[in-house]
Image: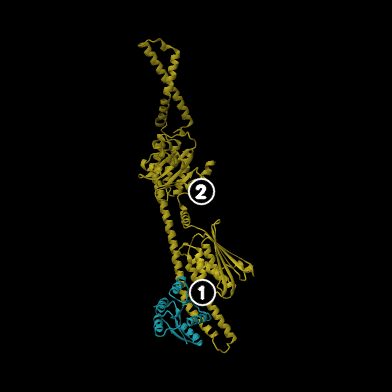
Chain colours: A yellow, B cyan
Amino acid sequence: MRLYLEKQKRFLRKILLGMGLFLTGFIALSFLYFISNRWIPLSWTANLIFQTFLMTFLCLAAYKPLDLGITKLFRHYLFKKKSYGQIMLIDLAEELAVILDLKEWANLVVNTFGEVFHLRTVALLVPGRDQGGFEVASAYGWSVSDVKKSKLSQNSILLELMRRRGSHVLVRDGEIQKVSWQEANHIAQEFDFLHATWVIPLTNERDLIGAIAFSASTPDVVYHEGDFQFFREFARAIGKSLHNALRFSELRAAYDELQDVQSHSLQRAKLSAIERLATGLAHEIHNPLTVISGKAQVLLLKKGKDILDEQVEEVLRTIVKQTKRAADITRKLLMFSQSSGAPREQLHLEQVLEDTVSLISYQTSLEEIEISRAIGNRMPAFYGNVHELREVFLNLILNAVQSIGSRGKIHCNLRYRSKEQVFEITIADSGPGISEENIDKLFNPFFTTRPDGVGLGLFVTRQIVHRYGGSIRVESQAGQGSVFIVQFPHQDHDDKAVQGEEFRGKGSLWSPLTATSLKDQKKD
Amino acid sequence: MNKLLVVDDEPEICEFLQAFFEERDFQVEFATSGKDALAKVEKKPPQVMLLDVQMPGMDGMQVLKEVKKKHPKVKVIMVTAIETREKIEEAMRAGADNYITKPLSLEYLEKDVQEKITQLAKA
């Protein structure tokens, strides 16, 4: 292992080589003299030029075998004591045995490996989330973006080779020479993809559970069979602990998922309890309210009545108004509880808007209020819950209706801004507008400017909009009408799923941070 | 005289509606259950029916479907404590003529009932 033969040893080796060559020459010359004296008395063997030529020839021929022999002698007999690198790796293997966190494990392996052997790149591969493939758990000397995208798919030739050969260390050039040029091309690509010249497979009970891929800082570094032997021993030593770390990370992921599901279902249970309560409440409260309000109205609208005492009439009107207010509160509560935690699906916002407008015309007699709609072209599908979104539209339009009073216009505009990837809904009314001091309080719960209002509509609307990661704002000047602008970010269903995964995988296999910090360290 | 049938499991509600509409020259009958309502419709079909959705036993939706099947001319106004879109749609599909929520606005209700009577007169 050239890397860790230190200076003194190299000097000693040169001396030994010189001595060996001298000895070879001496023996050869003695032998020549011996045979020329005894059996073949040739005068030309005593010729100095011939002797010099013979010596040079012998030295050249013997150099390489001698050098190799001495190196072997060094490695197997003279300096059998472990080298610095080997000692470090043995320490590392012991240290790794007690680490259960996969990320920590991976970081320690690539760091130590990289620093001990002065490597250019090191990467640790472990089984990925997709079945059969491998991904980078931690890397040394890689760029962050490479770490993110580097994966070996299920049908990678390199993985296939590792599975077939067991614990053999794969060498880029060696593997390429053994196969057809098409396969060689693939293999070379995969090695380059991992920025690697060598790959050490990590196994546990014959199963391939990981690999260390690395390359040296200079191209002339070569490792030999002896080094590979040691790498194999190292791989065997750490296989078990990698196996443990992998199992541990699986367990932890499963635990996180379980907690997620549990808290989600708890939330759902709580919400449906609220919903049931609100539904029951609405039923139980609305009937008595109907009786109270109805009887008061019967008196108020009595035909051919004697004129009611002014005070009595005032009281009756208050009763009617306040019962309506109480009913509105339970209704809002119900809407609020129904809208949360509901499942989301692909839908079209334009359809929800249409439905809401027709729903409003079912219920309210829109006497002289004109509702117009403008819908942009090419509206992508939206991923959401229809009840929640209808609630948003309903509240905004009802708000506009109520602020207008009896006569006016409402304009709803729905479009998709492809550049920003947002859905934008604007609802403009020709009402009296909102004063500056009220604009800030508009979305507060129980804030209302109407004497019979509840003040929950816009609050609930904003809650829902925020649930979708959207925004809501209002532009208004007193006397000029108001415009409510709602924006929802466009999210694909798939995107969402991926984001969720990443969020959940806080303890996931690789961290982009690792690669950066290691790269920085390397520069130092 | 115009005949009105009020159906609600809460007798107090039936009472004040009866008082209110009798004052406006309606002949008002009431029923406090779905079965009772169907029997009264069979005996003497009204022009307009105020029908509560949520009732124990046979609910308003079932009554509506029965009535519309046998007496499609009867105008039915559904009355409910809470509105859900599904219920509204179901009622509209089953042939309900309107859908109003509690607490009732008697002014609006009167206007609506009169409108239904006018529609019947025209037809």
Please, which chain is the residue tagged with disc 2 on? A
Pointer 2 local density, CA inside 10 Å: few below 14, some 14–19, many at least 20:
few
State the CA–CA distance, disc 1 to disc 2. Answer: 57 Å
SS at mark 1 in the image: helix
Instruction: State the image coordinates of residue A236 (x, y, percent, origin top left).
Output: 38, 42
Q: Could you tell me which residue is drawn at 41 percent across and 52 percent down? A: A250
Query: Residue A513 — which label?
Result: 2
| Depicted B55 relative to depicted A477: above or below | below
Q: Is B17 placed above or below A154 here? A: below
Residue A492 vs residue B67, the one in the foreground: B67
* Residue type, label 2: Leu
Q: In this view, does A170 lie to the left or right of A328?
A: left
Front tag of 1 and 2: 1
Q: How many neighbours does mark 1 have within 10 angstroms: few (below 14), some (14-19), or many (20 or more)?
A: few
**Which quadrant does the N terminus of chain A fall into?**
top left
Q: In which quarter of the image is residue B52?
A: bottom left
Question: Secondary structure beneath disc 2?
Answer: helix
Image coords of residue A43 (percent x, y): 40, 10
Is A64 situated left or right of A316 in this image? left
